[in-house]
Image (tube, rainbow, N blue to C red):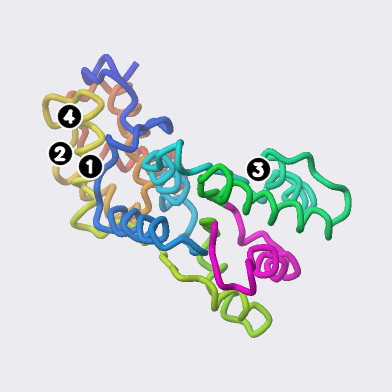
C-alpha cells in the first residue's frame, strides 16, 4: 500500500519501535534521565502524563537500559485485575507462591524483595502502570507494603505511572505518607511546536524515506492540529499517508492532511 508508494521499508510509527530508534525529544530525554536517577538512588518515583504522551514507551525504553543480571523487572498494569490480583502478581513476579490472606501476602512480598536483594544481589524493579485507577485504600497500602526496616532502607525501585491527575490525588492529606516517600516526580509533556516536525521527519527517515514526503504546510497543519500529542501526530501522519496513496500524491500537501483530520475525527 502506501509504504511501497512512498518507498518506505516499514511502518513509520510502529508500536514495536526500538528505543534506540526513538526521537530524542527534550522531554523524553528528561524522563529517561529522571528514571536513571531513580535507578541509582532506589526507592519510589512517580511518572505521569496525559493519554498518548508516551509514558508506556518511556517505561519500556528505561526497562531495556537495565542489566537483567542486576535488575529484576516486574511490570503490572492495574487495569488487568483487582487489588488482590495485583498483590498475587507481585508475589509471582518475585518467584513466590502467593499466600491467600492479604496480611500474609504483604509479608511474603516484603520477604521476597529482601531475599532477592540480599541473597541474589538483584534489585527488584516494580513498574505499576495505570495507577490513576487505584482506589485510595490501595494507594495507602503501597506506602505500607514498601516500608522496609522502619523506612531506613530501599532494597527496590518502584515506579508509579498513570495519568496526570494521579499527581494531584497524591497531594491530598490521606496520601501524604506515600507522597513524602516519592524521591522523583516527573510529568511527561506534549512535544513543543519546534520538535513536532522534527519528530515526524525522524520517524519517516527511520522508516526508509529518502525524499521529503510532506510539504512544509502539511507538516505545519499536523503540528497545529495535534498540539504535540505523539499518539495524535502518529495517527494524523499515517492517515495522511493513506489518503496521499489513494490520491496518488507524490508529495502530501495541506489539503491531504485536512482530509486525514476530517476522517480521523481528531
Q: Which residue is mark 4?
A: 251
Indicate yes or no whether the magenta region holds residue 225.
no
Q: Which residue is mark 2?
A: 215
Disc 4 to disc 2, C-alpha distance: 7 Å
Q: Nearer the viewer, mark 3 or mark 1?
A: 3
Q: Nearer the viewer, mark 1 or mark 2?
A: 2
**Which region of the structure is painted magenta?**
128-155
Q: Are marks 4 and 2 in contact (CB under 8 Å)?
A: yes
Disc 3 to disc 2, C-alpha distance: 52 Å
Residue under the image location 78 percent in, 39 percent down: 97
Q: Is residue 82 visible?
A: yes
- Residue 258: give x, y in percent of width and height: 32, 43
Q: Are marks 1 and 2 in contact (CB under 8 Å)?
A: yes
Q: Which residue is mark 1?
A: 254
Indicate the secondary structure of the residue bearing disc 4.
loop
What crowding class fits label 2: few (fewer than 14 Cα within 10 Å), some (14-19), or many (20 or more)?
few
Q: Is residue 37 left or right of residue 251?
A: right
Work out whether mark 3 precedes mark 4 in sequence or the reverse, and give the earlier one: 3
Work out whether mark 4 precedes mark 2 in sequence or the reverse, and give the earlier one: 2
Indicate yes or no whether the magenta region holds residue 135.
yes
Amino acid at each position: 500500500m502506501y509504504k511501497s508508494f512512498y518507498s518506505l521499508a516499514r511502518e513509520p510509527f510502529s508500536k514495536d519501535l526500538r528505543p534506540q530508534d526513538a526521537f530524542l525529544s527534550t522531554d523524553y530525554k528528561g524522563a529517561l534521565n529522571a528514571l536513571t536517577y531513580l535507578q541509582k538512588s532506589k526507592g519510589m518515583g512517580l511518572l505521569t502524563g496525559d493519554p498518548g504522551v508516551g509514558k508506556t514507551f518511556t517505561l519500556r525504553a528505561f526497562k531495556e537500559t537495565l542489566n537483567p543480571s542486576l535488575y529484576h523487572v516486574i511490570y503490572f498494569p492495574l487495569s488487568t485485575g483487582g487489588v488482590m490480583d495485583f498483590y498475587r502478581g507481585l508475589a509471582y513476579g518475585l518467584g513466590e507462591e502467593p499466600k491467600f490472606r492479604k496480611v500474609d501476602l504483604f509479608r511474603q512480598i516484603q520477604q521476597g524483595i529482601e531475599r532477592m536483594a540480599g541473597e541474589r544481589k538483584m534489585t527488584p524493579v516494580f513498574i505499576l502502570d495505570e495507577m490513576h485507577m487505584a482506589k485510595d485504600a490501595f494507594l495507602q497500602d503501597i506506602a505500607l507494603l514498601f516500608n522496609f526496616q522502619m523506612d531506613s532502607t530501599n532494597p527496590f525501585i518502584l515506579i508509579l505511572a498513570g495519568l496526570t491527575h494521579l499527581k494531584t490525588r497524591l497531594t491530598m492529606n490521606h496520601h501524604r505518607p506515600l507522597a513524602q516517600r516519592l524521591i522523583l516526580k516527573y510529568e511527561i509533556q506534549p512535544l513543543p511546536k519546534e520538535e513536532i516536525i522534527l519528530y515526524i521527519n525522524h520517524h519517516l527517515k527511520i522508516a526508509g524515506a529518502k525524499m521529503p514526503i510532506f510539504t512544509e504546510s502539511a507538516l505545519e497543519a499536523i503540528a497545529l492540529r495535534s498540539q504535540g500529542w505523539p499518539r495524535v501526530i502518529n495517527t494524523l501522519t499515517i492517515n495522511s499517508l493513506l489518503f496521499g496513496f489513494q490520491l496518488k500524491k507524490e508529495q502530501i500537501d495541506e489539503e491531504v492532511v485536512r482530509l486525514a483530520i476530517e476522517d480521523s475525527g481528531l
